[in-house]
Structures are given as structure tokens and as C-alpha cells.
Image (tube, coloured by chain):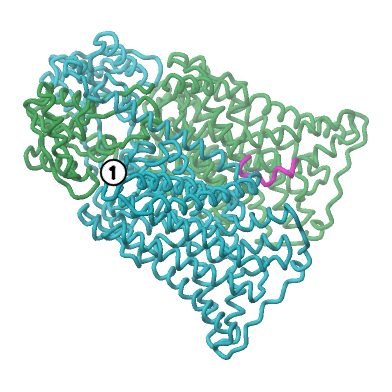
Chain colours: A green, B cyan
Amino acid sequence: MTISYAKIKRIIFGEPFPTRAEIHERLDKVRALAIFASDPISSNAYATEAIMSVLLLISVGALRLTLPLALGIMTLVLLVVFSYTQTILHYPKGGGAYIVTRDNLGVTPSLFAASALLIDYILTVSVSVSAGVRAITSALPQLFPYSLWLALLAIILLTWINLRGIRESGSIFALPTYAFVGGVLLIVFIGLGRLFGVFGAAAPEAVTVPPRLAETAGNVGGFLYVWLLVRAFAAGCTALTGIEAISDGVAAFKPPESKNAAQTMIAMGVIAMSLFIGITYLATHLHLIPFEQESILSQLARSVTTGVPGGGIIYAWVQFFTMMILVLAANTGFQDFPRVSSFLANDGFMPRWMQNRGDRLVYNAGITVLAVVAAVVVIVFRANEIRMLPLYALGVMLGFTLSQAGMVRLFTKISKLKPGETAQTRMTTIHYEAHAGWMRLLPAFGSLVTFVVLVALVVTKFMEGAWVVVVAIPLIVWLFRSINSHYATVANQLSTRDFHPSQIRAIADIVIIPVGDIHRGTLRAIRYARQISNNVQAVSILTNPDFEARIRRRWARFPDVTTGVELRLIEYEYRDILTPLVDYISRVSLEEYPGQLVTVVVPEFLTDSFWGQLLHNQTANFLQRRLRGNDGIVIVDVPYLIPEK
Amino acid sequence: MTISYAKIKRIIFGEPFPTRAEIHERLDKVRALAIFASDPISSNAYATEAIMSVLLLISVGALRLTLPLALGIMTLVLLVVFSYTQTILHYPKGGGAYIVTRDNLGVTPSLFAASALLIDYILTVSVSVSAGVRAITSALPQLFPYSLWLALLAIILLTWINLRGIRESGSIFALPTYAFVGGVLLIVFIGLGRLFGVFGAAAPEAVTVPPRLAETAGNVGGFLYVWLLVRAFAAGCTALTGIEAISDGVAAFKPPESKNAAQTMIAMGVIAMSLFIGITYLATHLHLIPFEQESILSQLARSVTTGVPGGGIIYAWVQFFTMMILVLAANTGFQDFPRVSSFLANDGFMPRWMQNRGDRLVYNAGITVLAVVAAVVVIVFRANEIRMLPLYALGVMLGFTLSQAGMVRLFTKISKLKPGETAQTRMTTIHYEAHAGWMRLLPAFGSLVTFVVLVALVVTKFMEGAWVVVVAIPLIVWLFRSINSHYATVANQLSTRDFHPSQIRAIADIVIIPVGDIHRGTLRAIRYARQISNNVQAVSILTNPDFEARIRRRWARFPDVTTGVELRLIEYEYRDILTPLVDYISRVSLEEYPGQLVTVVVPEFLTDSFWGQLLHNQTANFLQRRLRGNDGIVIVDVPYLIPEK
């Protein structure tokens, strides 16, 4: 059984890696970008559209504000990327919002940041997988009734890929990520070329405005106008999700870790923003209008490629890899959730076993917990990502706000150093840097803007579901605190400080052995009991008066084994023999040997198959379960195996 | 925890009964009839209709054959009741088809009888519950989408009632059973009275023939005619299901058990057949015709009560209790399945634990297994009893055929005795009886007729689903045989015949104790290990090079405990520490002490809450699970409880 289980495990998850192989499993920058950046890059599939959809509530004319808003968002993204690059360089062992906030703002803010981000990573998985499945069912409507199952299947696949190890999953994710980036860049390139007549071709024509939407466009003014602009900006901030991932995963990079991570971070920001601005520029200059039946990216790809040789292939390419990257965006959650969990577990705020790495050097427990929780969310929302969206992105904004505020504090500390001076914060080493005081302005501004976006998101989406997150974050913080105080209690109770061996509980020289019948199995157990004690009591429960004579007769047949062992027969007028056994053992333990360890020898009788085991009264098993958890009772399990032929 | 669990159990299932209370839990005849006869009595809700529906395939005129066929079925029922009355009197400890067949025809036929009957009891539950739910959803169509859930709920309710004990469930079942019997008798009484003008009232008018059905009636002749008559007869034989139950439940009656059981059996036959013939007589004389929208019983009740003062109430009464008794008919399955299972378990053909009686003196395991399997059937067939019906009633007919054939053999044995002589069969005592030779004719004829019905059922319904049962019966017999041979092997292996204590495996003086860290829990376990052996090895797995110095330092701090104990440190380059531990223990066991018992002391560290337990690496737990099932290793579990504050 054990051998075949291990084999199956190897086939599914691959050979275990020794701990020293960790360095070989590290990521180069090309793979790292694919594995960590799928979420921010995939945002380009819908970020422009998200802004335009809100602006359309003002008027069709307001769509010309899309590009300025997009440039504003780009500025914010570059600010955040800058902050995180600084974080990576200052916290070379990895430092997302949790670490930075903890080091600079204290434990409680850091737990809020961690709780917010964990919620968001779960939603990243649920939302991305559901959106990807919707893309598939749009193409193949006959699959629509199976949406939920497809989404769960996608989660299982992602879990499996991630459990196989980070380097391998990096390879798997590279192709679709780069294919998407390449396809969109090609569209932008052709589109710009045609727009400016570089190729000598006519400029592409915009898709006709769908009449229904053209009619709804009205005129608004004053406060509502500003409010809608803020909402449009906040909607576009979906482009910011997932930026955090690299900073938590610094330790997964090949050395020099922090330099490679920082470069990958910058590459990610530049690539994602080029796509974003390219798409937005073309979409507005081609006068595209968002409508339900076709996404802006699809409209863009279609109008740009129409009339271009091979245009159909380019269009299909972009559509296919858009669908792929929407599913794979979930992977950012799979990267970051287990890492942040392992940091928290290491600090005793989450179960300790979440910091263990499995056979393939990934955080198996974190990956599994994420998969289960995300699956629950998918089931609750029936794989409908539109209903999940109001809960999404809040967590990220809270994380960014706290993390950048933390960086402001860190730069303040650095600015107080004299040239050449070095100091130690709780979690890292800081050195003198010129202009550290001025550097603070960037994260300070970033923190302020993300805070405003956070407020906008909470206010606009509170009733649609954001309240769930607002309630959940402090609850999770409270959970972290409870877990931490549990570990503190346990450590204190187990501590050997001021402990003297004389405090170890005395061991009573008594062994109780429950005996149902006298057979080879029980004889072995009685022999064992006599070996470890001079005071052995065999206890048998009589539920049937005929049984007494029988057991006494059989007992007497083996004087070599039973001499010196007291046989106690207890009459009991119910059928549940465990209760009198447990009562007897407790009485002996509490009354005759209070404060001492009493030993119970349980003869256990095994067959070598699961089915065989099913056919027997599992008395030994149930007895052990009832006695376990009793601090004063040592259970000795003496097995007797019956080979089945 | 344990206390509150026991309390909840008592609230749900009631106080446990002592074994001596068994006699008080016995059933009087009034309750027994209600509890055992719900299935045969409920058959009246549809048996007449079942015959008529087949006859209608010949012609509307053929419906006049309903009464003769019903009289034939009545004769058969009375024959079977007679056989079973004889069985009960000859097997006073209870004797359904399994016992009688085993005693007279041998083990293999008896297993076929048992397997057939167990399948039928499962189907009794699934079919009755689904039919009852259909009756409810016909009245309240808005409940239709929840049919499956309602059926499962009904199974849960029946399970609960049956687990509370037989006498209590007898009281619960008495009201609806007698109310149904009373209601139908009242209808028959009024109907006959009006038909013969006794009340001075006009004879009731028949419901109009629905035109669609009148048209379909054609003419058939020759072989097909005979075949349809046989099928109509077989369809009416649904009235025979459930007759067996009392014979298996003799032991549940108040003394004198067999006399009371036989009387109840006869009362059941007389009541069920009075209703059956009364309904059939009226239905044919009122020229009722079965059609889909309204059952014959409802048509009858309606036409009889129309124009009678209070007739509406009587009609509603009959309809309501018809619905009730259809659900409660499932109870016959709940009575018989656990009893037949306990007989089989007692003989080692089913798991032994199926013969144990629970706190309320009922066969908990049998009741639970039945509920689970019946629920699975209900789920597979989506609570559609029409699709289950082709599988139903075959098992009963096979059981009757074998059981009555067995009675023929028994009477043959009795007929060979001389006056005053007594003999012993394997399972009962027989005495001389006058006319025993002639008595054989009745069960012989009954056996032949039930065999013909069995063949008719199999042939007509084979493709519609009966093949499942035809395949399942021998498979289950094979399963019984495998279980039996497993128990024989085990008994043989455990047997102390020719066993000498010197054959008991030697106990090696070695204790291995896995140690993760040195704390109060492990110190206690090391002290215990030293108490039971002079040769203690503490084993620690190093997955991290820093760990060695730490553990050696802490080890040295407690010389009182650790002196004389060898500390073995094993370096391991994977993270899964169980594998090297298990490997080490196996190596010591197999290479250093082959053929001897090696002891492993496992320090287990407990918290007093489930949530607390979740927060710890369950290494001790997993280690025990990996080592269990190894015949040569004794596991000693030394607990250390951390109270949580």
C-alpha cells in the first residue's frame, strides 16, 4: 500500500527535490516574469474597458478622457512599482506589504495589510478562473451549463501545476504570457502604423456605435461629474492588482536575488504599461465604444487587423491568448498567498505547518488552503465573476497604502543616517543614502493616491458586496491574534525554563489490559504487559452471563502467560462495552494513582487489507480514540497481524 | 466534549436501555401489526390498479377478470401466510426464508434467499419513500422540485424513529396504519351498502371513462391473451411483499412469542385481503377504469362518498392516510433488513458488527446500512419510483419460493416421525404431527405459484431493469461467501488450539523514541521509555544544519533524564521527516531484532480543543498511522496535554 501510494505521488507530482536543490529551482528573470506577472499583464484585457464603461455614464464624448485617466493610472503604477523596487532592494529576503508594514508601522497594521492581501489573492484566483471560463463558454456556448465544473477543474489544474514546483510552473506559464504580450504589441504596432499611414494603408475604421448605448449617453455635471471621474479612475486601478507578488517572492529568484527581482519588477511595469497605454491610445483614437457583446480588446484587434494580410490569424491569436492569460492570472494568487502565509506562519500568526515546504520545495499547505478557499468562493458565487468583482481590489489598495506608508517611514530612518553609517531595523539593515529625505515624496504620494482609490472603491461598491471584505479583514486579524496567543501559551507551557526533572509526572507501576477473548493476539499483549510491569490487570466486560465461564476456562489454559495477572470481570447491562472500560480506567487513574501516569495496553488485531479491517469490531480503535486526550494515560498498542490468504 | 456528545445522543435517541429491559421493549400484537404490516397493508393503495392496468391492454371488457384474478392472488397470499405461520410455529426463535432455507435446503440456497430479500428490503424503502413523496408532491406541486430532498428527509426520519427503539416506533406507526385500515373499510362498507341499497341510497355512479383510454382498448387473443393474464396476476402479486417481515421478527414479540407472531400474521393476512377484495369488488362493480390522473382507490373513495353526509371528510381521510402509509410502508424494510442482516452476521456471512444491538436494543448498524444504501438508490433513480418498480418484488418471490420449498422438506421430515417422537434438525426441534404428509401440499403449491410469478416478473421486466437484480443476487452471495471465508481464516489464525506460549513473539529490549525538540512533553516520554527499557534510543531528524547544536545543547541540560539514553541524529535532505524516521525504525526492527517486538515511544502533545490541535504539526499522529499495521512494532503513546487558557 505505502509503496504504491508513494509511486502514485511521484507520478503526479514528480520526484522529491532535496533541500540543497533549492538553488536549482530558483527562477531566471524570463520565467519569473511569466509566473509572477500574469495578473498585472492580464489586466490589459479589461482595464481600458473598465475606465470607458464608467465614462460612458457621463456621455459618449467623455470617452476622450480615457487616455488622460489612463496616463494618471500609469503614473500611479509606476509610482507603486518604484516603491516596491525600493522595498525589494531594502528587504533582500523578500518584503511585501506585510514585512514592510511590520518593520515600519508595527504588528497590527501589518496584520491588516496581510489579511487584506490574502483575501485579495483568494479573489484573484476565483475571479480570474471564472473570467477565463466565461471566455471559453462565450466561444463554446454548449459548455455554459458546466461553467462551475470547468472553473473547479481549472483550480485543480493550477493547484497541480503549482504543487509540481515553481521552476516547472514557470516554464508552463511562459508561453501564454509572452504570446499574449507579443500579440497585443503587434496589434498596437500595426494599429499605430495604420493610424499614421506608415504602411501606406488606410487608417482602420471604428466599429459602429451600437445604437442602444449611444442613446443612453446623457449629460451630467457638477459633483456627479467629478465623482464619476474618480470612479472611472478607481475602476482602471484594477491594473494595479498583482504588482505585489514579486516583492514577496524575492527568495525565489536566482542570485543576486534582490537585483534580479527589482529588474523583473521594472520590466513588468514597463511591459504592462506599454500595453495599457497602447491599447487605450488606439481605442480612443479609433473611437471604440464599450458594449456588452464584444470587449474593447476584441474590437480593437478586429478593426486593426481587418484588411491586413494574415489579419485573421493575428486576431485569433490575440483572442486565444487573452482567454489563456485570464485563467493564468490566477497564478499570481498561487504565488503570493502561500508565501505571505508562510511569513505569517513563521511569525506564529497562522498555523505553523503553513511554513513547511513539500517534496517539490513549494508551500504545499498554503497552495492547498488557497485552492480550497478559492473553490468555495467559486461555488458560492456559481463562477460568476461579475458578482465577485465588488469584493476585489480593495485588499490590494489597503496593502499598497500601508506598504508605501511603511516605505516613507523607512526612508525617514535612512535620512537620519550620516554618510557611511549603517543601522539595523527589526528586519533589515539600512545604509546611508543621499536624497533619502526627498525620496520619501514618491511613496508618500503613492500611498495617498491608493488610499483615495481605496475609499472610492469601498464607498461605490459597499452595498454590492464590498462590505463583506470590510467585515472580513478585522475578523481575520482577530484570528491571527488568537492563533498567536495560542502559540504563546503552548510555548510557555512546554518551556523548560525553570523546569526540573522532578516535576515530570510519576509513572505508576500499573498496566490495565482490556481483554475481549483469549486468543493469540491477546496472549501476546498480556505477555508484553507483564514485561513492562509487575502489576497487570486484565479487564473483561461481561454483557452476557454465559461469557464468564468461557473466559475463565480459556484464561486458565495458559498459566505461563496469565499467572500473576489479575483477571477482573465487570458485569454490564448495556451493549456498549467501551463505556464501562473507559469508566474503569478513569477510576483507577484518578482514584488509585492520582497525578501519575497509568498505562493501558491495547491488544490490536489487524488484517492486511482495508476490507478485512471493515469486517471486525473496531473496539481497540474506538477505545484508543476515547482514551486519547487524557493526559494521565499512556496507551500501548500491541498489534497482531492476521495475514489474509 | 465527550459529555456533551453523550448528552446530545440521549436527547436525539433517548436514554440507553439495559439489556434486561429487552423484554419490556417487546411488542404487543396491536403495535406489532402496525410496525410489521405497513408494507402489505399499504399494497392495497395500488394492487387492484396494478391488475387492472395490465388487463386494460386486452380490452375494457377484460376488466371483469380483475375480481377472479384478485381472488387467485388472495388464495396465494393466504397460502403464503399459512406457510409462514407454520414456519413461525416451527422456528420459535424467528425464521424467515433465510433460516428455513438454510435448515432444510442447505447454505447456498439460503444465501440466495437472503440476498434476494435484502435487495428487496432496500427497494421497499426506496420505492415506498419515493411513492409517498410523489403523493405529497401531487397534492402540493410547488414541492415537486424538492422531491429528491423530501425522499432523503423521509429516509432520515424513518432511520431516526427506528433507532429510537422498536416499541416506540410501534406506537408512532400504529395511528396511520389503523387509520388507513379503518378509512378503507369504511369506504368498502358504505360502498357495499349503497350498491345493495341497504341505506336506501342510490348506488354510487362510476367515474366517466376517460375517452383516451377507452379508445386504446382493443382485442387480443391466443397466447398473448394468456400472457397478459399471467402478467396481470404477477402485477397484482405486489400485494405479497412484506409478508415475510413478521417471521423474521418473532423475537420482538411479547411471550409467548411464536403464538403471538402467528396470530399477528394471520390478522395481517385477513385484514390485507379484506381490503384487497373489498376494493377490487367495488372497483369492478362500479366499472372504474384506471387512468393516470387519479388512482383507483381515489376514484373509488370519491364515487362512494359523493352524496353521503360527511363524505368529503371520509374522502380526505382516506387520501391523507394513503399518503402516510405509503411512506410508512418503508418501515417493513427497516424492520426486516437489520434482522436478516443480524442472522447473516451471526453466521459470519456479513460483518460481525451487524449483529450488535445499540443503546436502544435495535440493530443500529443494520438500520444505518439500510438507510445509506436506500438513499443511494433514491439518488440514483432521482426518487422516481416508476423506474425502480421493475427491480422490485423479484427478490420476495425468490424468497417465498425457497422458503416454502424448505417447509415442504421440513414437513417431510416431520411426517417420518412416529407419534410422540421428537427429532432435532440443525436449527430447531420437530415433533410428531398428524397429517404432516398432507400438509406439504399447501407450501408445495405456494412455492410453485410464486416460482411462476418470479419467472413472469423476470421475463417481462428483464430489460426494464430486472437484470440488475438477476446480476446482483449471485454477486451478493459471492460476497457473503468471501466474508465467511475471511472470518474462517481469521479464526484459524487466532486459534489457541495447539498453541504454546513459547510461540509468542519475543519482546526485544529496545525502545526508539523520535524527538523533535526537548520540551516538557518529550522529557516525560523519555522518562517513560527509560522506565520500560534499559536500551533507549532517541532519534532526531536534522533537516537543517543549525539544528544539531541546538538539540545537543538542550539535551545536555537534563542529564537526570537523558543519561543512559543514546541520542541519534540523522541528517536528511528532504523536508518530509516521517520517511527517515519510519526507515530507521524499520531497519532496526528487521535487521537488528528480526522476529521480535520492537517498541516505539511517541511523545504526543495535545491541546484540549479541536482548533488548538489544528494549529500543530501532527507529526506524532502521522507517525503512528505510518507504523500501525506493522506486526513487529509496539507503539506507546505518551501524551502531554497543554491546557489552553
Q: Is residue B521 visible?
A: no
Q: Is residue A144 part of the magenta span, yes or no? A: yes
Quadrant where the C terminus of chain A sits is top left
Q: Which residue is mark 1?
A: B423
Q: Disc 1 sits on a residue from what chain?
A: B
Rendering coords of residue B423 (x, y %)? 28, 43
The answer to which of B461 and A111 lies nearer the viewer is B461
Q: Please give the name of the residue rendered at 72% of the width and 68% of the height, measured from the top-left corner.
A: B61
Q: Residues within 10 Å of mark 1 (few under 14, many from 20)?
A: few
Q: Note whether residue A478 is visible.
A: yes
Residue B48 appears left or right of A20: right
The residue most toward the top is B591
Residue at (25%, 8%) from the top-left corner? B592
Quadrant of residue A603 within the rendered picture: top left
Residue extent of the magenta highlight: A140-150
Q: Main secondary structure of the magenta part?
A: helix
Decide if residue B400 is on the left or right side of residue A642: right
Label 1: element kind: strand
Q: Which image quarter: residue A305?
A: top right
Q: Nearer the viewer, residue B533 or A290?
A: B533
- Counting from the top left corner in percent of width and height, residue B26 is at 28, 59
Q: Is residue A261 magenta?
A: no
The reply, left or right, for residue B117 in relation to residue A461 is left
Residue drawn at 59 percent across, 89 percent down: B201
Indicate whether A244 appears above or below B543: below
Residue B127 placement (x, y as % from top left): 53, 55
Q: Nearer the viewer, residue A213 or A19?
A: A19
Q: What is the x, y in percent for residue B260?
A: 32, 62
Q: Amino acid at mark 1?
A: Ala
Considering the image in quadrants, where does the N terminus of chain A appear? top left
